[in-house]
Structure formats: structure tokens, C-alpha cells
Image (spheres, rainbow, N blue to C red):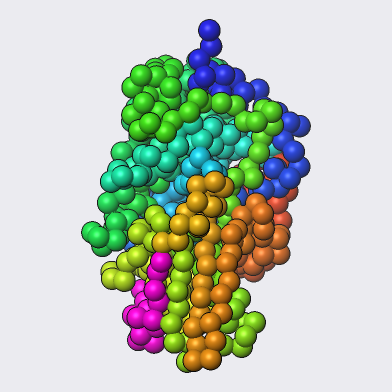
Amino acid sequence: MASPEADLVDYALALRPGDIPAAVARHATDIVLDTIGVAIGAAARAHHSGAICEAYVLDRRGRSSTGEATLWSGQGGVLADDAALCNGTWAEVLDYQDVVVDPRNNGHAGVAIVPASLAVAELVGADGAAFLTALVAGFQVSLAVLRALGRNHRNAGRGFRTSTLAAPLGATVACGRLLGLGRDQVLDAMGIAGACAVSGLMPSLSPAEGRFGMDKDLANGLSAELAVRAARLAALGMTGSHAVITGDRGVLASHGHGDATPLRLPAGEVPDLAAVALKKYPASYGVHACVEALLGLMDEHGLKAADIVHIVARVKADSASSLASRVLANHMAARFSLPYAIASAAVRQHCVLDDFEDAAIGDAAVRAMMDRVEVVADPALTEFHRATGGFPGEVEIRTHHAALRRRIDYPVGSAQRPMSRVEMAAKFQALTAGHLAPATQSALIAAIAGIGDIGDVRTVTRRLAPL
């Protein structure tokens, strides 16, 4: 009998462009644009984790590079494995990436799947339809793993990152499909990726430890790199377990912790990316609802920072704990601090990229406002999250004359409230401003939106040259 893994791989390999609903294909192109834009945005701001990773690769380029794939930062071509490593690291830096919003699990997927699959698509000279179909297939695998796994791998003191458990498996399937591997080879590749994945521990995201180090970013780059290498090694005959997810020592047994369910194909076997949200704000998704609610109230009532006496930010219980830090060691600590995000939005009356850079996080007015921000774990919001996977938030602004309250269940960028193409373009332009010429920005936005009709994806990636 075929294993659940084999059924999932058969489904992923059998998927054809015509099987993908138009709305799903469109969302997939938005995810590609978003991932590339976020990576370039981090590179344009010279964040250290991406810069160190890229310097490491470029130092070896003369000895090993054949220019198989493009560095999105504009630094040229390198081996596909190295491109996935660097681009995947850059794409994680700003914490501005895609988010899986599902009742069974949350995490990131595209931030590894896009760099890995696009690198291999360049390597083989795939057309846009082949790339897009492989990308969607990879997402279906990752989402299936996330839904089977559940949340307990990061609860009760456990600290395994969802992204490094599921995204490498989906990315590996996408790469294997692009390389033309058969079912057994793709199963081998998944087995290799699952067995050799980075551990995915989250110590750098602990408010108690307060380090907020660069390992978070590198873990994503290594996941994308592993996907490319696992598929290429399987093509050469390297073998791995064919039960890496459901086996007695597989992902579910090792990380399910009593919460795992059977591995299943997408509902009705129809590809669906509705669970993949994109971010309006450059910070942890857990702050988005509260920031949006705050800015909406301030705009509606004509409030200024000086009017605010106190702010209560209500969120789900685990966000109240994981986003509680008030010690801002660096830009990443700020992106994972609900008090900072709320205070910054209140003082600046916006939430944009520069608000989370190191130069901004020491602002005295923002630091003073943080003292007026109270974070509360709300049982009703916690239950809503468990039932829907959503990241709700409620803000109460107290002034000398009134108490104003607003709740947001689904932030802008979720399936319930997706960003428009105009908003997506504006985000890409803001991220790449000063790095790409305006004409190049426009050309890339158009090319990625229509990538399914392009004869060779390299016509898109060749445009990634800086000013």
C-alpha cells in the first residue's frame, strides 16, 4: 500500500497548471513578488545576517560558482544551493514575510519555498508555468505537514520553529519536480531534507533571553539551501526515508507531542493558498491587529500622541508572552515587541520599515510611550486563535476624556482581507526604493504578475540588478 508521503508526492507531481484556480495562481505570484521584495529590502538596508551569509558565499564564488542562479541582492550568479541560502536568509531578516494562518498551525513557508524553487527553476531554465506549478505543489506539501503536525512542537517550553519543520519538505518537493525527479527520488529527497534539517530551535526569539540573534535568519536560508541540495543529491542516487513525516521516527512522531493528526491531501485535492497571509507591517504578525486597530482609532478620532494617557493591547495568550519584550537589543527585538510596535505607531502615526531600524528604536518619545502600553492576554482572543488560526487583537486607547476600543480579527493581508495589487506594488516599491530603478521596479512587478506565461524565469531574475 502507498504511504501517506507517497500519496502526497503523487499529488504534487501530477499537478498541472490547469489544475490551479486562477485566484490561487494570482496569490502565488503575489507571494513571489513579496518574498523577493522583502529580501531586497533587507539587502538594501545591509542587515548583518544576510550580508555575512552573502559575503561567505561570494568569498568562495571564484572556486565554485557556475552562475546557476541569481542573488536577489544584485551581486550576480552563484550555485543554486548558495543562491537559495543567501536569498532565503535575506527574505527572513525583516520579519516581513508570508504567514500561514490555519486552525491547526501557524508559521512561514514561502520564505523558504520561493528562494529554493526559483533557484532550481533558473538552474534548469524552467518556464514560468512550470515554476509556478512547482511552487504551488510545494506549498500544498508544507501546508499538509503543518496541518498534520499541530502546534505542540512550540508549546509547554518546547521551542521548535514551525518553518524549519515543514517548509524544507515542501521546498524539496518543488525542487524535485523542477528537476524532473520521479516519485521515489522525490521521496528520497524529502527523507534527506527531513533527516538533515536544521533543528529549528527558537532561543533567539525568547523575550527572557533577549538575544534576538541572527541565527533565526540563517535557519531559514539553510532550510532553502537544504531543499535544493536534497533534491540534487536524490537525483544523483542519494536515498532517504520514504516515511519521513509519518514514520515511527518521523516528523509527527518526533514533534507532534500528542497533537498530530493524519497526513492528508488538500481538501478535494484542489490547490489552495488561502492559509498564506502576507504582511502589511514589517514586524511579527502578532502585532498587526493591534497596530491596525490603534492607527484606525487615532485617525478616526483625530488623536495625537499627546492625547494618550494609556493603551491596553489585548492579544492571544502566547503572543502576550512571546511579544512582551521591552528590552530592545536590536531591530529584531523591536519587531517582536508589541509594546514597541504600539508605542511607535502611536507616536509616529504610521508603521513603516524605518520605524524598526536600529536608528529608530532608541527614540525617546517612543520609549516614553512604551511605559503607557499595557499588554493583556485575552482568553476570548486566545480561543478565537485556536478555532481559526487567526491573529486577533484589540486596542483600548484611554485619553483624559474617553476610552476608545477597537478589535481586529483578521489583519490586512489575510485571506479575509487581502491586499490589492496596488498595495502589493506599493509594498514592493517601498522595499526596493533606492536599490532598483523605478522602471525596473515596474517591470518586475508586471513580469512576476504574469510569470505563468513567461518562457524562461531567467528573464525575470536578470532584472534584479541594482541602480
The x, y position of residue 123, in whole percent, is 53, 36
Would residue 95 be seen by someone viewing this image from the given angle?
A: no
In the rendered picture of this protein, how many numbered marks are placed on residues? 0
| Quarter of the figure that contains the C terminus | bottom right
Q: Residue furthest left?
A: 209
Give, as a single range, the part of the protein colored magenta.
355-376
Q: Residue placed at 49% from the left, 31% from the top?
A: 148
Residue 115 appears left or right of 65: right
Q: Nearer the viewer, residue 406 or 331?
A: 406
The x, y position of residue 448, in whole percent, is 67, 51
**Magenta residue check for 308:** no
Q: Is residue 177 above or below residue 325?
A: above
Q: Residue placed at 69% from the left, 31% from the top?
A: 270
Quadrant for residue 138, please give it. top right
Q: Residue placed at 50% from the left, 57% from the top?
A: 380
Quadrant for residue 458, please give it. top right
Q: Nearer the viewer, residue 462 or 50?
A: 50
**Magenta residue check for 375:** yes
Q: Residue placed at 56% from the left, 47% from the top?
A: 388
Would residue 129 be seen by someone viewing this image from the given angle?
A: yes
Q: Is residue 384 above or below residue 137?
A: below
Q: Nearer the viewer, residue 49 or 14?
A: 14
The x, y position of residue 433, in whole percent, is 56, 70
The x, y position of residue 363, in whole percent, is 37, 83
